[in-house]
Image (cartoon, rainbow, N blue to C red):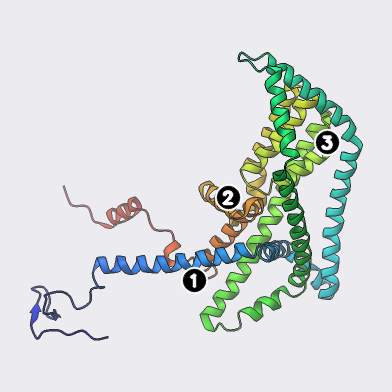
Amino acid sequence: MGLFFSSSRTVRPDENRPLLVTSAGKPGSMWSDGFGTLATRSLQVIIVGVIATALILGMLQLTVVVIPVLLALIVASAAAPLMAWLRRRGIPSVFATILTLLAFVVVLGGIGWLVVNAVRDQFDDLSKKAQDGFQSVLAWAESLPFDIDQKQIDEWVGNATDFLTSAQFGSGALAGVSAVANFLTGLVLMIVTLFFFLKDGPKLWEFLIRPFRGSDYDRAVRVGHKTVQTFGAYLRGTASVAAVDAIGITIGLLILQIPLAIPLGVLVFLLAFIPIVGATVAGILAALVALVTHGWVIALIVVGIVVLVNQLEGNFLQPVLMGRSMKLHAFAVLIALTIGTVLGGIVGAILAVPLTAAVWGIVQVWDGPNTPARWARRKQPIEEKVDTVTAGTPRSAD
């Protein structure tokens, strides 16, 4: 694409080289000024945004595949040190993978057995106490300053009964059956994918990065290593912190003789994988059970135990177990949680933080093992620049 210029030439006073101008007196390229640069950057941002949106929408349509693969990748990254240790002992990859999977099955099966037994043994007692607690809540509601008569309560109960017997609830139940089927499909896919990630993870990544050459190949190797390192550190650190939280809160619930203490402890462990809000939700549920079964005084004590354990974990344990590689600003974590929850619900909230940490880790090794991408490098503050210049300038004599 050519441009036609007039034969007129102008010379700037401070330069010896001529500047070509058009017959209309405008620069030869309309993209060379500041506004043209802004337009170019805006167009690039729009293109990147469209591609990212298309990828996200595509993944949302394939959540049955994407989520199990991501979960398998995170679990395989956490088990990478164990796999490496078994291989160094001369155990073939197949047998090392089987042993690792069996370890996961034993741990998860043991937790499930504890929960089922606790619920089965305490269900009748909890049901009776829940009914008594509900009646006490109704009696407390009648003593409020504003009127809530029995007619209103009966109307609320009737509305709830009508909803449970309505077609809307039936369609929701059918949707629940479909969700269970999708869950089982995703679980099977996750187990199969986890097997291959554990057995041939390095080989699979090596196959994917074969088209790269030179510095691009080195960058791809760094990206893969950093992603596995970040995912593994996140899952191992979070699981350790969640276990300490669950054990501490469970001990407090057992001392106070709260029903379903062990299932509540398991719930605390699971919800701890959702940063910021998980611990709050677990504490609310434990306090509600204590309120229904033992009254508001014990419920407040449970809240105090939950707050104390979370403060000890957040201020002392988490910085040690999670390490510096997982340090994300609270604002970044909050934004990631919001986006993940909107896009993927609870699973999205669980995956949002490790994905964000992995992306930031990739940025940190983009230009070298310890060299972040150019735009992400820490700049020297203006105050430090002024001090440096001032220190290097000789002082004038008085």
Quarter of the N terminus within the rendering: bottom left
Amino acid carrying mark 2 in the image: Leu
Residue position for label 3: 260
Q: Which residue is mark 1?
A: 367
| Residue 219: % across, % down | 54, 74
Residue 125 vertical position relative to residue 71 in the rendered view, above or below? above
Which is nearer the eye, 135 or 166? 166
Mark with earlier residue (3, 2): 3
Q: Which mark is residue 337?
A: 2
Alpha carbon distance from label 1 to label 2: 28 Å
Residue 182: horizontal and vertical position, in percent? 74, 60
Question: What whole-number distance in Å separates the C-alpha atoms at marks 3 and 2?
Answer: 29 Å
Q: Is residue 239 above or below residue 91?
A: above
Quarter-wise, where is residue 196 in the image? Answer: bottom right
Q: Pick whichever, 197 or 375, lies toward us.
A: 197
Q: Earlier in the sequence, mark 3 or mark 1?
A: 3
- Left or right relative to 318: residue 18: left
Say which element carries label 3: loop
